[in-house]
Image (spheres, rainbow, N blue to C red):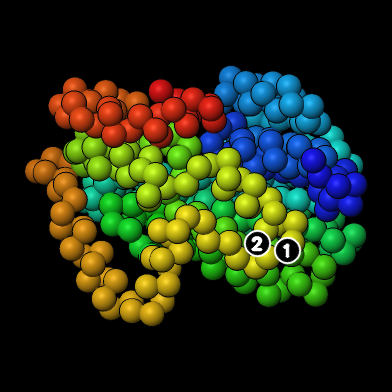
Amino acid sequence: MHSHDDPFRGAAALVTGASRGLGLLIAGELADRGARVMICARDPEELATAERQLRSRGGTVASTVCDLAEPDAPERLVAATVERFGRLDVLVNNAGLIQVGPLEAFGTEDFDRALDVMVRAPVRLVLAALPGMRERRHGRIVNIASIGSRVPAPHLLPYVTAKFALAGLSAGLRAELAADGITVTTVLPGLMRTGSHRAAAFAGRPEREYAWFAPAAGMPLLSMDAGRAARAVVRAAGRGRPELVLTPAAKLGSRVYGLAPATTTRALTLAARLLPSGGRHPSRPVDGTRAAAEAERRHPLVGALTALGDRAGRHTNEPG
């Protein structure tokens, strides 16, 4: 139970990418604490399922279908939230996309898509939300970056590039907006058991990329239960914390990289050499469900190793 002086009680919140995974769980946590929540995502069916799920818990929830890569979508989304709830107090920039593969498998369009969703959209959302927050001299902005924005994991370069930019934007916003009574929290999650490996795109040799990424995403020692992660994110936002690093592995990686960047980079170089090459004709990104089917056909052990992550995905509306 949460107290009547909960900072989220009665607040109007917008959570992007909230039809599944961590975004859905953050929206649920906010709703449980008395916030009125607008969720958005690209897929209308997934979004309707998420809205029903959140309402069944007693939450005040609305939803808007939108593709945040479209330049005018963020402004329309903020306007829809204000129209529905009268204001916007809490903005959670969670929408993201993961592309896994060697650099040679990606084109500029893959980087553009990552930057559109994970950098340009958050910038536009913040700029659209700020006038109202400044007027009330109150607001909370939460940017879900990644430990990949501190320790640049190989074979995730479009994602890492966008998350580095988002983390920089977030830290800069915190410094500039503090005087206006607006807190900004940067979240750096490590791997979480949300089943997101099914929603990722895989390039180069997709089945081989899936075979290393999917098991890692669900391993108990490397990954974290997504429900616990969502509660930690909302707690940190309520307290106005500047930064939250999630998972013990991510905390360790962040500290080691900060203390010994050259040694860490050598380790990352070695890891990159151990990962699959793109081959002579690297494949363009294919969706995770297709990569999974091929990986599980070729490598029978992969299905067993991804069982934890798959089970988590069924609770958070991930495909598969």
Task: Pick the residue in front: 96 or 275.
Answer: 275
* Residue at (25% x, 64% y) in the render: 268
Q: Which residue is mark 1?
A: 240
The amino acid type of the residue labelled 2 equals Thr
The amino acid type of the residue labelled 1 equals Gly
Task: Pick the residue in front: 62 or 220.
Answer: 220
Q: Which quadrant of the view contains residue 39?
A: top right
Q: How many marks?
A: 2
Residue 119 visible from this viewpoint: no
Residue 225 visible from this viewpoint: yes
* Image height of 307 relative to 12, above or below: above
Could you tell me residue 45's position as x and y percent?
Answer: 58, 19
Q: Which residue is mark 2?
A: 185
Q: Which mark is residue 223?
A: none
Q: Are marks 1 and 2 in contact (CB under 8 Å)?
A: yes
Earlier-in-chain disc, 1 versus 2:
2
* Residue at (74% x, 26% y) in the render: 57
Q: Is residue 72 left or right of residue 209?
A: right
Could you tell me residue 171's position as x and y percent?
Answer: 60, 69
Could you tell me residue 158's position as x and y percent?
Answer: 37, 53
Q: Which quadrant of the view contains residue 239?
A: bottom right
Secondary structure under tag 1 reads: loop
